[in-house]
Every structure is written in C-alpha cells, then in structure tokens.
Amino acid sequence: MDVASDPSVKQRLLSRNFNIIECPLCSFHGMASVPLIYHDPAKETLLTFTPPELNLTLDQKESMLGGLTRTLLGNIPTQERKAYLLQPQEMLSMDGLINAVLAGEGVTPEMIEKQRAQTQLIQDLATTSKTNLPDRIKENDEQIDAQFFHILDAIKQQYAGQTDSPITQELQHLEQHLLSHSTFGRETSSRLQAFQTAATELESLGENLTRETFVELVADAKDPHHITSLITLARPAADYEFFILLTAKIEDSDTQERQRLEATRSLVLETVQKIDAAAEEQSKIAINLLDKLLHMEDIEAAIKENLSEIDETFLMVLQQRIDSESRNKNPKLTNQLEELQRNIMQAIHDSAPPEIQFINELLSTKTDEDAATLIKQRLPEITDKTLAAIHRAIEQFRQRGQTDVANKLESLHTLAEKERTDANIT
C-alpha cells in the first residue's frame, strides 16, 4: 500500500475498505488475511503487518514481507531512498497499524477512542429493534455528531452496490431514524431542506434573478438556515447594492417587520463575512501550494503527494494564474502552468475509483447522444456499485445546488439501468 503511487490507499486503510474479497459460493464479504506493507514517503513511514491467523513462521514472514519491500524499493528512484526504508516498523494488529497511520496525521489516542466508541454505537443501533431505536438514539444523543455521520457514511460505502444486502437496508433504516430522532440529525435535515429550498427558488427565477428579486427572496425567508443557504448559493448577489436595497426595505417596514428584517440583515452580513473569510483562507492555501508545485523537480511525484490538498479552489487559482500569465505574454510560465494543469487533471482521474472515473467521463460528454453511446460501449463495466455511485453523485450535486448536472446524471442513471435490464445484466 504505497501512498505515493495511489493516494487513495490511506483512506481505504483507515476505513478498512481494502483487500476485500467476495465469495460467490458462500457470500462471504470481508477483508482477506494477507501480509501487507504501508508506505507514506511524505511522512517517512514504512509499516508492516502480518495477520496472526496466518500462523507463519518467522522465516516465512520475513520472506513474504521481504519480497513486498523489495518490490516497493524497486519503484523508488535510488536518489530518493532514505534511511527509514531500511527500518520498517512491525505492527502487531490491524488496529495498531491504523492507529500508527492516524498518529502520523495528528490524531490523538482520545480521538481514536471516540471514533471506536462511535463505531461500536453504530453497530449496536443497527441491530436495535425498530420499536426501541428512537429511545436508544435519544439516550446516546451526545455521541451523535458530524464525525458519527462520517463514520456511518464510510461503513455504508463498504456495502455500496449491495442494495439487497440486509446490512445495507439496516444502515439506511438507521440513518433515517438518526435524522429524525437525534439533535444533530434534525439540525442536519433542517439545513439540507433549507438548502434544497433555496436552490429550487434560485433556479426557478433563472434569468429573472436580479438584486431586487434576490432581496425579496431573502426578506421573505423566515428560517435562518433558509437565509444562509440563499446567501451561500448566490454570494455575488449579496453586494453593496443589495444591502442598500435591503436597508430601504427595512426603513419602509412597520416596527415588528423592521425588527425581523434587521435581524435578517445582521445574519446576511455575518454569513457574507464568514464566506469571504473562508474563501480568502482557502485562496492563500491554494496559492502557496501552487508556488510549491511550480518549484518541484519531479512534478508528477509532487502532485501525487499533495493530491488530497488539490480542490476546486486550487483549480480556480491555477486557471486564474494561467489567464494572467497569458495576458502578460509570458509564454514560458504559461506553458509550465498549463502542463501542471494537465498533469493534475490526469492524476485526479487516475486516482479516482473506476466508478467515479466513469461518472467524470459521462459528464465530459458534449451531447446526450455521446453519453448514451458511452453507456452502451461500457455496459459490462456498469455494475450495481457504479449505479450506486451515480446515485450518490446525483444527491451531492442537488445538495450543492447544481440541479442541471444532477438532472443530467439522473437521466443517464435511468438509461444505464434500462440498458442493463435489456442486456439481462444483474
């Protein structure tokens, strides 16, 4: 498991979603018991683990781990080999291996223990009867937070595509109850509902969205989550002129309505400040990373090591820099930046799971006909896991207000299901 060659292995290790095997005869779904080594050059970490149930002799263990280590070293240029590679740390358990990786990320034993307790709680709740589940959720309300839902989502990902599995159904049932009966769940549901409402309202206005109509939308919104969602989705519209129009509306209102609108104005201003502060911080991080990458000799290796830090903000900063250097007629730097952009996009594509790569290819098609042709050509690769990934992507795009993209994917999801049915693929 080499983070340098495949950055996704770290997350797969932490979520225990690696070396998974499925037996078509006995329906076993679980982790294969095989020796492994974990390498993260950025952390100068080399860890080994041999499952005790293999009952290997010392010679057998050294032989197998030695072979894996030699394979790893063979993929590392001689000039990049460091002393830590000659002293791998042996982990005695899978938990020990995961804890060592987490420690390298700054995760404390207390944080690990909290995660373990929350994972156990998920397992307990998943097997609790429907009658007792609401009360059990309320009894453990303090433990149910954002991290709890992240862990639940990671567990769900392990069973993605197994729509008929009892475990999948139990987890979906549990999530629905958590959203209804836990404090954090209800708050999350409220925020999501407000976000979806705001997205629908803005989409329905279309070309009729002006500052005047936006002011009316914000002024009519009664729920704080609804207000913050509108501002988050249409931040550029909440400019100086927007506040002038909103202030004029406040001054023309009666006393009770004025108080409500003044509270709305304060919330809008607070939200704008938070959005701008976060955007500025993200932009600074992206600029520093871009400068760092431009000065690296082995650009492909540098991209792999920093791939987890490359996000939409970074790509936007990179494109802005390309445009700026092009306008300033600096062809050498422009070409360097464009080459960096191509390498990054290729690395992102290569590091994504096959189903995510397929989704990106679908979204890259220029016409519906091209997308339909791609589905037919790649039909044998479209599995239940692929369809589940498309469904999750649809939900994510809707949550982010990208309704057009979500609708396109939804029609392609329907088409893929129909093609599989017509081809008798199950």
Image (cartoon, helix red, strand yellow):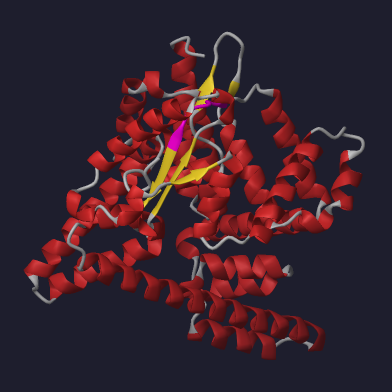
Which residue is painted at 71% across and 70% down in the image? 224
Q: Is residue 311 visible in this depiction of the protein?
A: no
In x, y percent, where is residue 202? 54, 61
Nearer-the-camera pick, 224 or 218: 224
Which residue is painted at 67% across and 65% down in the image? 226
Nearer-the-camera pick, 78 or 142: 78
Looking at the image, the residue that sits furthest to the bottom is 251
In x, y percent, where is residue 237? 49, 74
Task: Using residue 172 as the reference point, say whether residue 42 is left or right of it.
Answer: left
Which residue is painted at 75% across and 86% down in the image? 258
The magenta stretch spans which residues? 30-36
Q: Is residue 363 magenta?
A: no
In x, y percent, where is residue 214? 56, 71
Which residue is painted at 61% across and 11% down in the image? 26
Q: Is residue 34 magenta?
A: yes
Q: Is residue 55 visible in this depiction of the protein?
A: yes
